[in-house]
């Protein structure tokens, strides 16, 4: 290529900082990865939440704990019977003509619903550690596809009794305990900092979509001619099929992806810079992580968020039945309404954060704290309003509206503390999420127990007594939300921590020397991307200039720059957006 005079054809990196520049190499591989991960998260949640509705259809609640001998003589079996033999005992509209119904006690149903968390909590930290050592690809595959396979086996296990189902649910929790720490690892490797909020909002909206699909769709499946087993077969089958898609398309990082363009790989790696380890296998610095106050701020706010989340997800149908007096049809429909609005608010949050990133009107830490405050303070105040109105005698439409607002505000958390792990450490964001999610999901066990203690047995209480108990539950939930976010505002940060660059690391699976990497990029960059190599002793560092259209530079680097195709002054100001 011939040298071009500067006056006739000045390169874009010689233009003033306020001159609009072309878009960076866009590509779509990272967007495809985000959509696949969001779909996998949605299917994982469908396999998790479907039991809450299926257990209503597959068990009878019309019998008391003390079964009469006359019924034993009619049914001939203490554990299951055909609905056609005893139609007067099972009036659920979700039962098909040939569905089997099991006689499980209230305690047995509780074991089935809580067994998932026994395994889920255990695998959070090991899953994060394994993803850092060996990469997340196959652990995500095992989590989603394995959970789907176990879901397919649930109807068979149910025919043997509740405890085989408990065993399957524990194994399912072990599988899904791998998923979300690995997803955070993927966000740290695939999402450029300027796009991280949008990518997080997209991926983390998957659980909301999965919850909505489970609550609205599984009920319809249970009412179909296939009966309640289809509520397990459809989500489980889709999860297994997703595993095939992930096996074909998934990759640990841009370095190991064979379908990504060189331009997009260069853009992602340069935007992450030295904060990401690339393809290196790192040892998690747990001691340094536990000594960091902002990490404990995330753990506290994560625990508070999970308390309210699982309180609403597991107990909202119970509140609507006992206090608001909804029948089962109305209960299922109204319970899915808040999660339908959550899907739309998640899309809105993703759009707003994209606008903020493009205009650069907020710093990362300000974005995290503002959106987290919108979510937690909003939900805390909504819970307190529910507590007051429930005690005074709330109208059903008002209660549904407040519950819908509370659930919808969870969308703000997608760009709040939920992605803050990756801000602090792109290398160990998955490990940090595993730690906070492990502690936080203990609240999935505590929240239902709190309701049983505060509200008590709903069979022996008046409506006013139940309303008073629920008002205390909502008051406690509101205080948890408000206090957790206050701690996050005080101690939360968003800058990369020093221990993100560990001294003790395993041997890299691929040579990632900066000088050699940039030399390779120099040969493959598109005409819209320019490389500047600074003069100096070897190895010479490289600098990629990637300016979005219409953006203004924030930082200027002054360095002597020899350029292969141009003759430039010895001192040159290069504007770089980072």
Image (spheres, grey):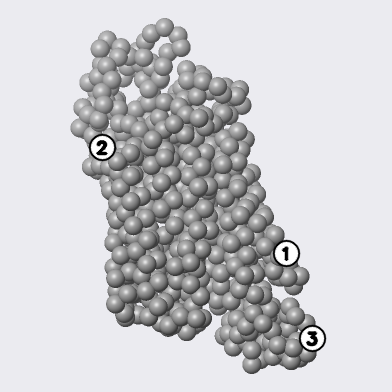
Q: Quadrant of residue 367?
A: top left
> At 31% from the left edge and 33% from the top edge, which residue is drawn?
547
Contact between labelled residues 3 and 1, with CB atoms less than 8 Å apart: no
In the rendered structure, which disc, 1 or 3, sits on the residue that comes first in sequence?
Answer: 3
Kindly state the secondary structure of the residue where label 2 is placed.
loop
In the rendered structure, which disc, 3 or 2, sits on the residue that comes first in sequence?
Answer: 3
Dot 3, how many residues are within 10 Å of its Cα: few (below 14), some (14-19), or many (20+)?
A: few
Dot 1, how many residues are within 10 Å of its Cα: few (below 14), some (14-19), or many (20+)?
A: some
Q: Is residue 268 above or below residue 306?
A: above
User: Which label number is shown at residue 76?
Assistant: 3
Kindly state the secondary structure of the residue where label 1 is placed.
helix
Mark 2, residue position: 551
Query: From this viewpoint, is residue 239 visible?
Result: no
> At 51% from the left edge and 63% from the top edge, which residue is drawn?
449
> At 35% from the left edge and 80% from the top edge, which residue is drawn?
396
Question: Which one is closest to the eye, mark 3 or mark 2?
Answer: 3
Q: Looking at the image, which residue sits at the far top?
A: 537
Is 470 on the left or on the right of 441, as rendered? left
Contact between labelled residues 1 and 2, with CB atoms less than 8 Å apart: no
> At 32% from the left edge and 14% from the top edge, which residue is drawn?
561
Kindly state the secondary structure of the residue where label 3 is placed.
loop
- Spatial separation of the CA atoms under disc 2 and disc 1: 59 Å
Q: Tell me residue 232's x, y (percent).
A: 64, 68
Contact between labelled residues 2 and 3, with CB atoms less than 8 Å apart: no
Q: Tell me residue 402's x, y (percent).
A: 32, 70
């Amino acid at each position: 290529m011939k040298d071009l005079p500067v006056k006739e054809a000045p390169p874009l990196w010689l233009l003033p900082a306020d001159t609009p520049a072309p878009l960076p190499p866009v590509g779509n591989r990272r967007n495809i990865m985000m959509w696949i991960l969001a779909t996998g998260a949605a299917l994982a949640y469908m396999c998790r939440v479907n039991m809450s509705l299926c257990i209503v259809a597959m068990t009878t609640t019309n019998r008391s704990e003390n079964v009469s001998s006359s019924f034993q003589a009619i049914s001939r079996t203490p554990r299951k019977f055909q609905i056609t033999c005893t139609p007067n005992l099972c009036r659920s509209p979700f039962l098909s003509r040939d569905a089997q119904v099991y006689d499980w006690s209230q305690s047995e149903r509780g074991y089935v619903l809580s067994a998932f968390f026994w395994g889920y909590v255990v695998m959070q930290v090991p899953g994060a550690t394994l993803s850092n050592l060996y990469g997340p690809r196959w652990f995500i595959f095992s989590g989603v596809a394995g959970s789907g396979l176990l879901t397919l086996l649930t109807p068979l296990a149910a025919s043997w009794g509740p405890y085989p189902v408990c065993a399957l649910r524990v194994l399912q929790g072990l599988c899904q305990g791998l998923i979300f720490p690995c997803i955070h690892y993927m966000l740290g490797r695939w999402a450029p900092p300027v796009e991280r909020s949008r990518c997080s909002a997209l991926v983390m909206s998957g659980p909301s979509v999965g919850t909505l699909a489970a609550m609205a769709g599984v009920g319809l499946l249970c009412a179909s001619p296939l009966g309640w087993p289809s509520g397990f077969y459809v989500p489980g089958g889709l999860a297994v099929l997703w595993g095939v898609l992930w096996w074909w398309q998934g990759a640990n990082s841009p370095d190991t992806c064979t379908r990504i363009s060189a331009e997009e790989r260069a853009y992602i790696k340069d935007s992450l810079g030295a904060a990401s380890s690339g393809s290196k296998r790192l040892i998690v610095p747990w001691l340094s992580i536990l000594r960091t106050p902002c990490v404990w701020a995330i753990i506290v706010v994560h625990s508070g968020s999970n308390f309210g989340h699982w309180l609403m997800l597991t107990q909202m149908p119970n509140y609507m039945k006992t206090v608001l007096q909804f029948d089962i049809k109305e209960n299922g429909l109204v319970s899915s309404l808040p999660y339908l609005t959550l899907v739309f608010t998640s899309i809105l949050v993703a759009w707003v954060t994209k606008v903020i990133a493009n205009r650069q009107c907020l710093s990362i830490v300000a974005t995290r704290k503002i959106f987290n405050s919108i979510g937690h303070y909003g939900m805390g105040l909504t819970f307190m309003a529910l507590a007051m109105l429930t005690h005074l005698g709330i109208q059903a439409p008002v209660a549904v509206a407040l519950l819908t607002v509370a659930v919808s505000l969870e969308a703000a958390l997608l760009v709040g503390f939920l992605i803050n792990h990756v801000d602090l450490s792109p290398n160990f964001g998955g490990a940090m999420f595993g730690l906070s999610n492990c502690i936080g999901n203990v609240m999935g066990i505590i929240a239902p127990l709190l309701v049983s203690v505060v509200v008590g047995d709903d069979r022996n209480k008046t409506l006013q007594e139940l309303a008073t108990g629920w008002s205390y539950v909502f008051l406690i939930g509101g205080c948890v939300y408000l206090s957790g976010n206050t701690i996050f505002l005080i101690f939360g940060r968003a800058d990369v921590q020093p221990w993100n660059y560990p001294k003790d690391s395993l041997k890299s699976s691929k040579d990632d020397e900066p000088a050699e990497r940039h030399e390779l990029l120099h040969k493959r960059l598109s005409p819209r991307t320019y490389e500047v190599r600074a003069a100096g002793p070897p190895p010479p560092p490289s600098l990629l200039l990637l300016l979005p259209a219409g953006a203004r530079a924030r930082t200027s680097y002054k360095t002597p720059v020899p350029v292969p195709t141009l003759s430039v002054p010895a001192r040159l100001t290069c504007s770089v957006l980072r």
